[in-house]
Amino acid sequence: MNNQTLLIVLFTTLLFSCTENKKSTQSTKQVPTNYQVKIDSLLEAYDKNNKFMGSIILSKNGKIVYKNAVGFSNIKLNQKAGIHTKYCIGSVTKSFTATLVFKAIEENKLKLNETIESYFPNIKNAKKITIAHLLQHRSGIPSYTKDKWFFENRTQYISPRKMVSKISAYESNFEPNSKGEYSNSNYFLLSLILEKVYNSSYNNLLQEKICIPLQLNNTYVGKEMNPNESYSYTYDDMWNEFPKTNLSTAKGTGAIVSTPKDLNTFFESLLSGTILSEENLQLMKDVKDRFGMGLFRYTINDRHGFGHRGRIDEFRATSIYFAREKLAFTLISNGATIDINGVYQEILKLYLNDTPIEISENDVKKFVGVYVSQNEPDEKTVFIQDKNVLINFIKNEFKEPLVYKGNNRFVLEQMYAESISFTFSADGKQMVFEQSGNTWKYTKE
Protein backbone atom coordinates (compact mmCIF):
# COMPACT_ATOMS: atom_id res chain seq x y z
CA MET A 1 0.00 0.00 0.00
CA ASN A 2 1.55 3.31 -1.01
CA ASN A 3 1.65 6.37 1.21
CA GLN A 4 -1.28 8.24 -0.34
CA THR A 5 -3.46 5.12 -0.34
CA LEU A 6 -2.62 4.69 3.33
CA LEU A 7 -3.54 8.31 3.89
CA ILE A 8 -6.94 7.84 2.24
CA VAL A 9 -7.67 4.69 4.27
CA LEU A 10 -6.83 6.46 7.52
CA PHE A 11 -8.75 9.58 6.56
CA THR A 12 -11.81 7.52 5.59
CA THR A 13 -11.59 5.72 8.93
CA LEU A 14 -11.68 9.09 10.65
CA LEU A 15 -14.74 10.11 8.65
CA PHE A 16 -16.74 7.10 9.68
CA SER A 17 -15.69 6.43 13.19
CA CYS A 18 -17.77 10.41 16.86
CA THR A 19 -25.46 26.29 39.51
CA GLU A 20 -23.15 24.28 41.70
CA ASN A 21 -22.81 21.27 39.52
CA LYS A 22 -21.75 23.39 36.60
CA LYS A 23 -18.61 24.45 38.42
CA SER A 24 -15.46 22.41 38.78
CA THR A 25 -15.48 20.39 41.97
CA GLN A 26 -11.98 21.55 42.89
CA SER A 27 -11.33 22.26 46.56
CA THR A 28 -12.44 25.77 47.50
CA LYS A 29 -8.93 26.36 48.85
CA GLN A 30 -7.45 26.01 45.37
CA VAL A 31 -7.30 28.83 42.89
CA PRO A 32 -8.55 27.50 39.52
CA THR A 33 -5.89 27.38 36.85
CA ASN A 34 -6.42 28.78 33.38
CA TYR A 35 -7.39 25.43 31.84
CA GLN A 36 -9.88 24.76 34.65
CA VAL A 37 -11.65 28.04 34.00
CA LYS A 38 -11.74 27.38 30.27
CA ILE A 39 -13.03 23.81 30.58
CA ASP A 40 -15.63 24.89 33.14
CA SER A 41 -16.83 27.61 30.77
CA LEU A 42 -17.02 25.15 27.87
CA LEU A 43 -19.08 22.66 29.86
CA GLU A 44 -21.34 25.37 31.26
CA ALA A 45 -22.11 26.50 27.71
CA TYR A 46 -22.87 22.92 26.63
CA ASP A 47 -25.12 22.39 29.66
CA LYS A 48 -26.96 25.70 29.23
CA ASN A 49 -27.74 24.89 25.60
CA ASN A 50 -28.75 21.26 26.23
CA LYS A 51 -25.76 19.95 24.30
CA PHE A 52 -24.20 17.62 26.84
CA MET A 53 -24.77 15.86 30.16
CA GLY A 54 -22.10 13.78 31.86
CA SER A 55 -18.87 13.58 33.85
CA ILE A 56 -15.20 14.22 33.08
CA ILE A 57 -11.97 13.48 34.95
CA LEU A 58 -8.33 14.10 34.04
CA SER A 59 -5.56 12.53 36.12
CA LYS A 60 -1.85 13.30 35.94
CA ASN A 61 0.60 10.88 37.58
CA GLY A 62 -2.37 9.24 39.29
CA LYS A 63 -3.65 12.49 40.83
CA ILE A 64 -6.86 14.19 39.69
CA VAL A 65 -6.12 17.53 38.02
CA TYR A 66 -9.65 18.23 36.76
CA LYS A 67 -13.11 16.87 37.49
CA ASN A 68 -16.58 18.08 36.68
CA ALA A 69 -20.11 16.86 36.07
CA VAL A 70 -23.01 18.64 34.39
CA GLY A 71 -26.66 17.85 33.79
CA PHE A 72 -28.86 15.26 35.43
CA SER A 73 -28.41 11.59 36.22
CA ASN A 74 -32.14 11.18 36.92
CA ILE A 75 -34.38 13.89 35.54
CA LYS A 76 -37.56 12.36 36.95
CA LEU A 77 -36.15 12.74 40.48
CA ASN A 78 -34.42 16.05 39.65
CA GLN A 79 -31.12 14.39 40.59
CA LYS A 80 -28.04 16.25 39.39
CA ALA A 81 -25.04 14.37 38.06
CA GLY A 82 -22.02 14.36 40.35
CA ILE A 83 -18.47 13.17 40.14
CA HIS A 84 -19.49 9.87 41.78
CA THR A 85 -22.37 9.20 39.40
CA LYS A 86 -22.13 5.76 37.80
CA TYR A 87 -22.76 5.20 34.09
CA CYS A 88 -23.02 2.34 31.63
CA ILE A 89 -19.71 2.39 29.73
CA GLY A 90 -20.66 0.27 26.70
CA SER A 91 -17.73 -1.10 24.73
CA VAL A 92 -15.12 0.26 27.14
CA THR A 93 -16.07 -3.04 28.81
CA LYS A 94 -14.02 -4.78 26.10
CA SER A 95 -10.76 -3.51 27.59
CA PHE A 96 -11.67 -5.20 30.88
CA THR A 97 -12.63 -8.41 29.07
CA ALA A 98 -9.39 -8.46 27.10
CA THR A 99 -7.43 -7.89 30.31
CA LEU A 100 -9.22 -10.84 31.92
CA VAL A 101 -8.38 -13.01 28.90
CA PHE A 102 -4.70 -12.14 29.20
CA LYS A 103 -4.85 -12.81 32.94
CA ALA A 104 -6.25 -16.24 32.05
CA ILE A 105 -3.37 -16.75 29.61
CA GLU A 106 -0.86 -15.85 32.31
CA GLU A 107 -2.57 -18.35 34.63
CA ASN A 108 -2.40 -21.06 31.94
CA LYS A 109 -6.17 -21.19 31.57
CA LEU A 110 -6.15 -20.13 27.91
CA LYS A 111 -3.85 -19.79 24.92
CA LEU A 112 -4.01 -17.09 22.28
CA ASN A 113 -3.71 -19.53 19.41
CA GLU A 114 -6.26 -22.08 20.62
CA THR A 115 -9.38 -22.37 18.52
CA ILE A 116 -12.91 -22.06 19.81
CA GLU A 117 -14.56 -25.25 18.49
CA SER A 118 -14.49 -26.88 21.93
CA TYR A 119 -16.51 -23.95 23.31
CA PHE A 120 -18.79 -23.16 20.37
CA PRO A 121 -18.77 -26.05 17.89
CA ASN A 122 -21.74 -24.71 15.93
CA ILE A 123 -20.21 -21.33 15.09
CA LYS A 124 -19.12 -21.08 11.46
CA ASN A 125 -15.34 -21.58 11.08
CA ALA A 126 -15.00 -22.45 14.77
CA LYS A 127 -12.06 -24.74 13.92
CA LYS A 128 -10.21 -21.77 12.39
CA ILE A 129 -11.14 -18.98 14.80
CA THR A 130 -8.73 -18.46 17.69
CA ILE A 131 -8.89 -16.54 20.94
CA ALA A 132 -6.58 -13.98 19.33
CA HIS A 133 -9.00 -13.53 16.41
CA LEU A 134 -11.85 -12.79 18.81
CA LEU A 135 -9.73 -10.30 20.74
CA GLN A 136 -8.65 -8.42 17.61
CA HIS A 137 -11.96 -8.53 15.72
CA ARG A 138 -10.53 -10.86 13.06
CA SER A 139 -12.96 -13.76 13.45
CA GLY A 140 -15.41 -12.99 10.65
CA ILE A 141 -18.32 -13.54 13.06
CA PRO A 142 -21.04 -10.92 12.38
CA SER A 143 -21.96 -8.54 15.19
CA TYR A 144 -25.26 -9.53 16.78
CA THR A 145 -26.00 -5.88 17.53
CA LYS A 146 -26.56 -5.35 13.78
CA ASP A 147 -29.32 -7.95 13.82
CA LYS A 148 -32.86 -6.55 13.74
CA TRP A 149 -33.80 -9.28 16.21
CA PHE A 150 -31.46 -7.81 18.79
CA PHE A 151 -33.00 -4.33 18.69
CA GLU A 152 -36.48 -5.78 18.92
CA ASN A 153 -35.53 -7.71 22.07
CA ARG A 154 -32.69 -5.74 23.66
CA THR A 155 -34.73 -4.52 26.66
CA GLN A 156 -35.55 -8.10 27.70
CA TYR A 157 -33.48 -10.74 29.47
CA ILE A 158 -31.90 -13.08 26.93
CA SER A 159 -30.06 -16.16 28.14
CA PRO A 160 -26.45 -16.82 27.09
CA ARG A 161 -27.61 -20.03 25.40
CA LYS A 162 -30.09 -18.08 23.29
CA MET A 163 -27.45 -15.50 22.41
CA VAL A 164 -24.97 -18.20 21.34
CA SER A 165 -27.68 -19.88 19.28
CA LYS A 166 -28.32 -16.62 17.42
CA ILE A 167 -24.61 -15.96 16.87
CA SER A 168 -24.07 -19.54 15.67
CA ALA A 169 -26.73 -19.10 13.00
CA TYR A 170 -24.83 -16.29 11.27
CA GLU A 171 -22.80 -16.96 8.13
CA SER A 172 -19.22 -15.77 8.36
CA ASN A 173 -18.46 -12.29 6.98
CA PHE A 174 -14.95 -13.29 5.89
CA GLU A 175 -12.26 -15.92 6.30
CA PRO A 176 -10.81 -15.76 9.84
CA ASN A 177 -7.71 -13.55 10.11
CA SER A 178 -8.06 -12.19 6.56
CA LYS A 179 -9.05 -8.75 7.83
CA GLY A 180 -10.47 -6.88 10.82
CA GLU A 181 -14.12 -5.96 11.37
CA TYR A 182 -15.59 -4.76 14.66
CA SER A 183 -18.04 -7.27 16.10
CA ASN A 184 -19.69 -7.31 19.51
CA SER A 185 -20.18 -11.05 19.13
CA ASN A 186 -16.44 -11.60 19.64
CA TYR A 187 -16.38 -10.22 23.16
CA PHE A 188 -19.70 -11.75 24.18
CA LEU A 189 -18.15 -15.13 23.34
CA LEU A 190 -14.91 -14.29 25.16
CA SER A 191 -16.82 -13.58 28.37
CA LEU A 192 -18.52 -16.99 28.13
CA ILE A 193 -15.14 -18.67 27.56
CA LEU A 194 -13.79 -16.96 30.68
CA GLU A 195 -16.78 -18.16 32.71
CA LYS A 196 -16.22 -21.71 31.51
CA VAL A 197 -12.47 -21.96 32.15
CA TYR A 198 -12.80 -20.43 35.62
CA ASN A 199 -16.20 -21.91 36.48
CA SER A 200 -17.19 -18.49 37.76
CA SER A 201 -19.38 -15.59 36.64
CA TYR A 202 -17.98 -12.76 34.55
CA ASN A 203 -18.75 -10.27 37.32
CA ASN A 204 -16.99 -12.40 39.94
CA LEU A 205 -13.91 -12.59 37.71
CA LEU A 206 -14.05 -8.85 37.12
CA GLN A 207 -14.11 -8.20 40.86
CA GLU A 208 -11.49 -10.79 41.80
CA LYS A 209 -8.93 -10.10 39.07
CA ILE A 210 -9.30 -6.35 38.52
CA CYS A 211 -11.66 -4.36 40.74
CA ILE A 212 -10.62 -5.54 44.18
CA PRO A 213 -6.84 -5.31 43.52
CA LEU A 214 -7.23 -1.82 42.01
CA GLN A 215 -9.91 -0.72 44.52
CA LEU A 216 -12.41 0.05 41.78
CA ASN A 217 -15.30 0.23 44.21
CA ASN A 218 -17.83 1.58 41.70
CA THR A 219 -17.22 -0.82 38.81
CA TYR A 220 -19.34 -3.91 38.23
CA VAL A 221 -21.56 -5.70 35.74
CA GLY A 222 -24.84 -3.83 35.60
CA LYS A 223 -28.13 -5.52 36.39
CA GLU A 224 -30.79 -3.72 38.38
CA MET A 225 -30.43 0.03 38.82
CA ASN A 226 -28.23 0.69 41.86
CA PRO A 227 -28.07 3.93 43.87
CA ASN A 228 -26.33 6.76 42.06
CA GLU A 229 -26.59 5.08 38.66
CA SER A 230 -27.53 7.31 35.77
CA TYR A 231 -30.23 6.95 33.15
CA SER A 232 -29.53 7.97 29.57
CA TYR A 233 -31.49 10.53 27.56
CA THR A 234 -32.27 11.75 24.07
CA TYR A 235 -33.22 15.35 23.37
CA ASP A 236 -36.28 16.61 21.47
CA ASP A 237 -37.25 20.03 22.89
CA MET A 238 -36.58 18.37 26.26
CA TRP A 239 -34.55 15.47 27.65
CA ASN A 240 -36.40 12.13 27.34
CA GLU A 241 -35.37 8.94 29.10
CA PHE A 242 -34.10 6.27 26.69
CA PRO A 243 -35.35 2.68 27.19
CA LYS A 244 -32.59 0.76 28.96
CA THR A 245 -30.93 -2.25 27.34
CA ASN A 246 -31.04 -5.37 29.47
CA LEU A 247 -27.34 -5.93 30.10
CA SER A 248 -27.74 -9.71 29.89
CA THR A 249 -27.43 -9.06 26.15
CA ALA A 250 -24.09 -7.30 26.57
CA LYS A 251 -21.96 -9.24 29.08
CA GLY A 252 -18.23 -8.92 28.28
CA THR A 253 -18.90 -6.78 25.24
CA GLY A 254 -20.63 -3.89 27.04
CA ALA A 255 -22.26 -4.67 30.40
CA ILE A 256 -20.01 -2.82 32.85
CA VAL A 257 -21.14 0.15 34.95
CA SER A 258 -18.42 2.46 36.25
CA THR A 259 -17.30 6.03 37.00
CA PRO A 260 -14.72 8.21 35.23
CA LYS A 261 -12.44 8.00 38.28
CA ASP A 262 -12.46 4.19 38.27
CA LEU A 263 -11.83 4.08 34.52
CA ASN A 264 -8.85 6.41 34.82
CA THR A 265 -7.40 4.18 37.52
CA PHE A 266 -7.95 1.07 35.42
CA PHE A 267 -6.39 2.37 32.21
CA GLU A 268 -3.48 4.00 33.99
CA SER A 269 -2.77 0.75 35.84
CA LEU A 270 -3.14 -1.39 32.73
CA LEU A 271 -1.10 0.78 30.38
CA SER A 272 1.67 1.53 32.87
CA GLY A 273 2.24 -2.20 33.20
CA THR A 274 0.98 -3.01 36.70
CA ILE A 275 -1.69 -5.58 35.70
CA LEU A 276 -0.19 -7.69 32.92
CA SER A 277 3.27 -8.71 31.82
CA GLU A 278 5.08 -6.37 29.43
CA GLU A 279 4.80 -8.98 26.67
CA ASN A 280 1.03 -9.34 26.99
CA LEU A 281 0.47 -5.60 27.30
CA GLN A 282 2.37 -5.15 24.04
CA LEU A 283 0.13 -7.75 22.39
CA MET A 284 -2.91 -5.76 23.49
CA LYS A 285 -1.38 -2.62 21.95
CA ASP A 286 -0.32 -4.14 18.62
CA VAL A 287 -2.73 -2.77 16.03
CA LYS A 288 -3.91 -4.57 12.88
CA ASP A 289 -6.56 -3.04 10.64
CA ARG A 290 -7.18 -0.36 13.30
CA PHE A 291 -7.77 -2.84 16.15
CA GLY A 292 -5.58 -3.81 19.07
CA MET A 293 -6.60 -6.61 21.41
CA GLY A 294 -9.13 -4.74 23.50
CA LEU A 295 -7.55 -1.36 22.83
CA PHE A 296 -7.71 1.45 20.29
CA ARG A 297 -4.78 3.71 19.49
CA TYR A 298 -5.50 7.45 19.69
CA THR A 299 -3.50 10.40 18.39
CA ILE A 300 -4.43 13.90 19.51
CA ASN A 301 -2.16 16.84 18.71
CA ASP A 302 0.90 14.65 18.18
CA ARG A 303 0.25 12.88 21.47
CA HIS A 304 -0.23 9.13 21.34
CA GLY A 305 -2.39 7.12 23.71
CA PHE A 306 -4.36 3.91 24.07
CA GLY A 307 -7.84 3.33 25.40
CA HIS A 308 -11.34 2.50 24.25
CA ARG A 309 -14.63 4.15 23.47
CA GLY A 310 -18.13 2.83 24.05
CA ARG A 311 -21.77 3.41 23.32
CA ILE A 312 -24.86 1.74 24.72
CA ASP A 313 -28.31 3.31 24.69
CA GLU A 314 -27.55 7.06 24.84
CA PHE A 315 -24.44 6.60 26.97
CA ARG A 316 -21.10 7.54 25.37
CA ALA A 317 -17.79 6.77 27.07
CA THR A 318 -14.17 7.43 26.10
CA SER A 319 -11.10 6.60 28.16
CA ILE A 320 -7.54 7.27 26.99
CA TYR A 321 -4.16 7.01 28.69
CA PHE A 322 -1.21 8.95 27.29
CA ALA A 323 1.85 7.13 28.62
CA ARG A 324 4.46 9.77 27.78
CA GLU A 325 2.45 12.49 29.52
CA LYS A 326 1.26 10.08 32.25
CA LEU A 327 -2.18 11.53 31.63
CA ALA A 328 -5.46 9.63 31.99
CA PHE A 329 -8.70 11.04 30.63
CA THR A 330 -12.27 9.80 30.83
CA LEU A 331 -15.47 11.38 29.61
CA ILE A 332 -18.85 9.67 30.02
CA SER A 333 -22.04 11.21 28.70
CA ASN A 334 -25.60 10.14 29.41
CA GLY A 335 -27.09 12.58 26.89
CA ALA A 336 -25.66 14.66 24.07
CA THR A 337 -26.77 16.50 20.96
CA ILE A 338 -23.22 17.14 19.75
CA ASP A 339 -20.31 14.97 18.65
CA ILE A 340 -18.72 13.53 21.78
CA ASN A 341 -15.41 13.09 19.97
CA GLY A 342 -15.29 16.84 19.44
CA VAL A 343 -16.08 17.47 23.11
CA TYR A 344 -13.24 15.41 24.51
CA GLN A 345 -10.74 16.64 21.94
CA GLU A 346 -11.57 20.23 22.85
CA ILE A 347 -11.22 19.49 26.57
CA LEU A 348 -7.85 17.84 26.05
CA LYS A 349 -6.63 20.74 23.94
CA LEU A 350 -7.64 23.20 26.65
CA TYR A 351 -5.86 21.18 29.32
CA LEU A 352 -2.75 20.67 27.21
CA ASN A 353 -2.79 24.33 26.13
CA ASP A 354 -2.25 23.36 22.51
CA THR A 355 -2.63 26.79 20.99
CA PRO A 356 -1.96 26.97 17.23
CA ILE A 357 1.33 28.39 16.03
CA GLU A 358 0.72 31.29 13.67
CA ILE A 359 2.07 31.33 10.12
CA SER A 360 1.56 34.01 7.48
CA GLU A 361 -0.20 33.54 4.15
CA ASN A 362 3.02 34.45 2.38
CA ASP A 363 4.98 31.75 4.21
CA VAL A 364 2.30 29.13 3.47
CA LYS A 365 2.64 29.91 -0.26
CA LYS A 366 6.13 28.40 -0.31
CA PHE A 367 4.70 24.95 0.42
CA VAL A 368 1.86 24.97 -2.12
CA GLY A 369 2.32 22.63 -5.06
CA VAL A 370 2.79 19.04 -6.20
CA TYR A 371 5.48 16.93 -4.54
CA VAL A 372 6.84 13.75 -6.11
CA SER A 373 8.24 10.78 -4.19
CA GLN A 374 11.97 10.30 -4.73
CA ASN A 375 11.54 6.52 -4.54
CA GLU A 376 8.28 6.16 -6.47
CA PRO A 377 8.02 8.82 -9.21
CA ASP A 378 4.38 7.95 -9.93
CA GLU A 379 3.42 8.80 -6.37
CA LYS A 380 2.51 12.43 -5.77
CA THR A 381 1.00 14.47 -2.96
CA VAL A 382 -0.65 17.85 -3.45
CA PHE A 383 -0.85 20.87 -1.15
CA ILE A 384 -3.15 23.84 -1.67
CA GLN A 385 -3.76 26.99 0.37
CA ASP A 386 -6.70 28.64 2.10
CA LYS A 387 -5.38 31.97 3.41
CA ASN A 388 -2.85 31.01 6.12
CA VAL A 389 -3.84 27.31 6.21
CA LEU A 390 -2.01 24.62 4.25
CA ILE A 391 -4.33 21.87 2.97
CA ASN A 392 -3.39 18.37 1.86
CA PHE A 393 -5.42 17.58 -1.27
CA ILE A 394 -5.66 13.78 -1.38
CA LYS A 395 -6.31 12.13 -4.76
CA ASN A 396 -8.26 15.21 -5.88
CA GLU A 397 -11.03 14.12 -3.52
CA PHE A 398 -10.32 14.80 0.16
CA LYS A 399 -9.21 18.18 1.46
CA GLU A 400 -7.70 18.03 4.91
CA PRO A 401 -6.38 21.17 6.67
CA LEU A 402 -3.03 20.71 8.37
CA VAL A 403 -1.94 22.06 11.76
CA TYR A 404 1.25 24.11 11.77
CA LYS A 405 3.76 22.98 14.40
CA GLY A 406 6.59 25.40 13.66
CA ASN A 407 9.92 24.90 11.86
CA ASN A 408 8.18 24.28 8.52
CA ARG A 409 6.36 21.22 9.90
CA PHE A 410 2.65 20.56 9.39
CA VAL A 411 0.59 17.71 10.84
CA LEU A 412 -2.52 15.85 9.76
CA GLU A 413 -4.11 14.89 13.08
CA GLN A 414 -6.09 11.65 13.19
CA MET A 415 -7.99 10.50 16.22
CA TYR A 416 -7.71 6.71 15.73
CA ALA A 417 -4.42 6.50 13.87
CA GLU A 418 -0.92 7.94 14.02
CA SER A 419 -0.54 11.57 13.00
CA ILE A 420 0.99 12.24 9.60
CA SER A 421 3.81 14.78 9.51
CA PHE A 422 4.95 16.88 6.54
CA THR A 423 8.25 18.72 7.08
CA PHE A 424 9.39 21.09 4.33
CA SER A 425 12.74 22.61 3.53
CA ALA A 426 12.93 26.37 4.13
CA ASP A 427 12.58 27.09 0.40
CA GLY A 428 9.69 24.65 0.00
CA LYS A 429 11.47 22.53 -2.62
CA GLN A 430 11.82 19.40 -0.48
CA MET A 431 9.37 17.63 1.84
CA VAL A 432 9.61 14.68 4.22
CA PHE A 433 6.47 12.59 4.80
CA GLU A 434 6.56 10.79 8.17
CA GLN A 435 4.24 8.38 9.97
CA SER A 436 4.79 5.74 12.66
CA GLY A 437 8.56 6.19 12.49
CA ASN A 438 8.70 5.69 8.72
CA THR A 439 9.87 8.51 6.42
CA TRP A 440 9.62 9.18 2.70
CA LYS A 441 11.29 12.03 0.81
CA TYR A 442 9.54 14.17 -1.83
CA THR A 443 10.64 16.87 -4.25
CA LYS A 444 8.44 19.67 -5.61
CA GLU A 445 7.70 19.48 -9.33
Image: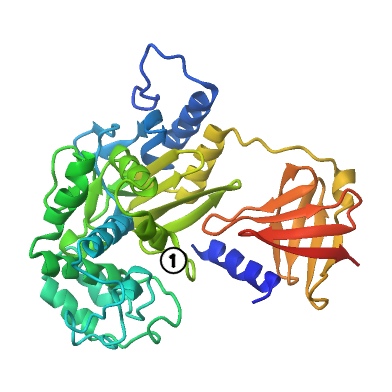
Q: Nearer the viewer, residue 39 or 99?
A: 99
In-front residue for pair 120/112 = 112
Give the left or right position of residue 102, taking residue 362 as reference.
left
Residue sitting farthest toward the left: 199
Q: Position of residue 270 (x, y in %)?
A: 34, 48
Name the image quarter holding the N terminus: bottom right
Return the x and y of residue 241 as percentages of the image width and height: 26, 49
Task: Tell me which residue sits at (74%, 55%) in the image.
Answer: 422
Q: Is residue 323 visible?
A: yes
Asked whether, in this view, residue 318 is left or right of residue 10, the answer is: left
- Does the image show residue 157? no
**The residue under label 1 is which amino acid type?**
Phe
Q: Which residue is mark 1?
A: 291
Residue 88, horizontal then vertical, whole percent: 26, 50
Q: Say if 414 sits above or below 160 in the image.
A: above
Q: Nearer the viewer, residue 294 or 9?
A: 294
Residue displayed at 38% across by 37% down: 56
Quarter of the image with the C terminus in it? bottom right
Relative to 352, residue 24 above or below: above
